[in-house]
Image (cartoon, rainbow, N blue to C red):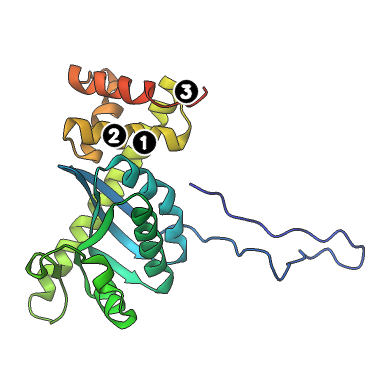
Amino acid sequence: MPEPAYTARSHTRESAAPAVSANAPAAIPPCTATMDVTPDQDRMTVTLWGELDLGSRRLLPDLHDILTLSDSGIDLRLDTVGFCDCSGVNVLLDLRSHALGQGKTVTVRSSGRAVGRLLDLTGTRELFTEGVAPESVRTEGRDTEGAGDGLHAEVGRLRRTLQTRPTIDLARGILMASFGLTPEAAWSVLVRTSQNTDTKLHDLAGDLVGTAQGGTLPEQVRRQLTAAAASLDCPP
């Protein structure tokens, strides 16, 4: 993940306040979104929770890694994104541009009210439905019928996110320590192993964290982790 850019401090005697250059990039706020990744044949399905705003740009390095590891692209499920602004749409457009450069696609398979409304207002929805049958794209929240059930489902998914994200971060730490990987490389190893073993990312992370408590990994998973780490040219 990129670190926030900080403004330079003034070195004049007249003021001790930070000097902000007109051309200095604004610091990126913390990311309030999280994601889960599931391999799906030649594509990767990415489910996002939380808010897509300026801070969600911090997800781009991981999304680019997932895109690289896929054969044909990424399918996004955005049902439980509770807030989305133009910065969030720009993140999606950045990912799409990156995909086109690799001859791949990014589609929005499902979206909630927040994302769907903004995609419609900005006229960008069709950019994420290329090659997708209209009936296979689902947009939630266009009416209030069943809203209570949708809210309960969203709360359940958000609780699951709070439980699984720390596990994924711990698993990355274990891989960093075991194979001498950078945080980015450890993420790539997790995603690649998830894809090669057809295992959900959070399940794989949980199994890996369990080894620190005396558990063992299935032989196939252990081999795939080792192979994925060995394939990366990352200095210890």
Amino acid under label 2?
Arg
Residue pictured at 26% horizontal, 73% vertical = 125
Across and down, in percent, residue 89 comes to 37, 69
The residue that disc 3 covers is: 180
Regarding mark 3 in the picture, which secondary structure is present there? loop
Look at the numbered discs 1 and 3 and tell me whether their residues touch, using CB distance below 8 Å. no
Within-10-Å neighbours for mark 2: few <14, some 14–19, many 20+: many
Regarding mark 2 in the picture, which secondary structure is present there? helix
Residue pictured at 7% horizontal, 69% vertical = 135
Across and down, in percent, residue 133 comes to 10, 66
The residue that disc 2 covers is: 192
Relative placement, left or right, of 197 versus 93 is left
Regarding mark 1 in the picture, which secondary structure is present there? helix
Across and down, in percent, residue 120 comes to 27, 80
Within-10-Å neighbours for mark 3: few <14, some 14–19, many 20+: some
Say whether residue 113 is visible.
yes
